[in-house]
Image (cartoon, grey):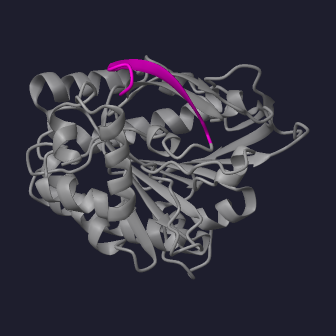
Amino acid sequence: MLSLTAVVWDEASGAYVLRTYDRDEPDCAALLAHLGRALVTEVVLRVGANTDLRCVSRTDIPAGELFAAPGTGGRTLASFLDRAGRVEAIWFAFTEYPWLKVWSVSPTRPLTSRHARTPYNYPFSDSVPTPVADLVGRMVSDGAWYLAPVLGNAQYDVAALGLVATLSADLWGPSKNTLLYLRPTTLRIATNGYGVLTSRDQVQRVVAEFTAFYRERLTAYADRGQFPVNGSVEIRVTGIEDPAHVGVDGAQTPLLSALRPRGDRPEWDTVVWLNILSLPGTPHAEAFLSQIERFLLRTFDGEYAMTRVEWSKGWAYTRDAAWSDGEVLGTVVPSTFGEDVWGVASGTLDRLDPHGVFGNAFLDRLFR
């Protein structure tokens, strides 16, 4: 992002006005990720070339191998990341074989790859297949939440068979065609979200510790006849916000981005994104996700990794609701950015909107 235009208070005129901020202006740093505490009306972007990517999908690697502890060898998530640079794992609840996608830069089409001339190449996930829809209907309408393991396996079967039937297991083409796959017709779900900031060589450790705890908790709940997850776990890996990539001298780093680097940990150059998906209204989901959140915060606490919330997803869980835990809202979230950074961001947003036009009860709690 090279510049943005926002609605801000102008003291001289005593009114709100439109003002454009270039990327090298300090106030721009608070507006780049403002959490709804400001109103941005226009942005100027610089985008890269639409690189050709190959996307290979696999559904034959057990979770125990893909998410194994580091140093065990085999086909681990980190091994694919090291070779290709871009990975995503979708692990349906109560199944053993995740759907792994591996993207690699490929200027020319490999002989085995199908040319993806348009995006959305997984029609079996774009629209809810009848077997999955029937199960979802029974769970939501009849309260048959115990069908979660059946639904998880049905979703896996649809993905594994669909990749073969649609010739989508090996795709090649412009990045927009090989990366975009979610449509409005995709099954609507509730999602929690966290980004774990760490170094590249610790990715497998983060994934292994998270998935081991997730599996243990899911099994413990199921043993009590409770099924808080009926969607999937999704794991992705990205880099961090590097202002050098902007191509503007003095470019500001977003103050409140989950991808913001830690100045005292320059080796933390990677973020592992962790999401758990369930149907809205699933019993025991919030209690389960509260335990997951507490695990992430105490395990990745700054020693070799640190947990930040993913703003657009669910977080700050109590046993009953998301965005409700007072300690996470008031203490934990600001501390993951540093009190000084949080203070600068909060102060800037207050100065640009001193009358709280863009505030609400939730933001007042978060920025208190």
Q: Residue at left 32%, top 55%?
A: 343
Q: Main secondary structure of the magenta part?
A: strand
Quadrant where the N terminus is found in the figure: top right
Query: Residue 295: x percent and y percent?
Result: 26, 67
Query: Residue 200: x percent and y percent?
Result: 60, 69
Image quarter of residue 108: top right
Q: Is residue 79 left or right of residue 277?
A: right
The stretch drawn in magenta includes residue 17: yes
Q: Residue at left 66%, top 35%?
A: 2
Q: Residue at left 19%, top 44%?
A: 323
- Compared to 95, does 355 lie above or below? above
Q: Nearer the viewer, residue 151 or 364?
A: 364
Residue 167 visible in the snapshot: no
- Badge count: 0
Q: Nearer the viewer, residue 310 or 253?
A: 253
Q: Read off the magenta span.
A: 11-23
- Compared to 97, does 31 lie above or below? above
Q: Residue at left 13%, top 46%?
A: 324
Query: Residue 180: x percent and y percent?
Result: 60, 29
Image quarter of residue 239: bottom right
Query: Residue 17: x percent and y percent?
Result: 42, 18
- Compared to 166, does 224 lie above or below? below
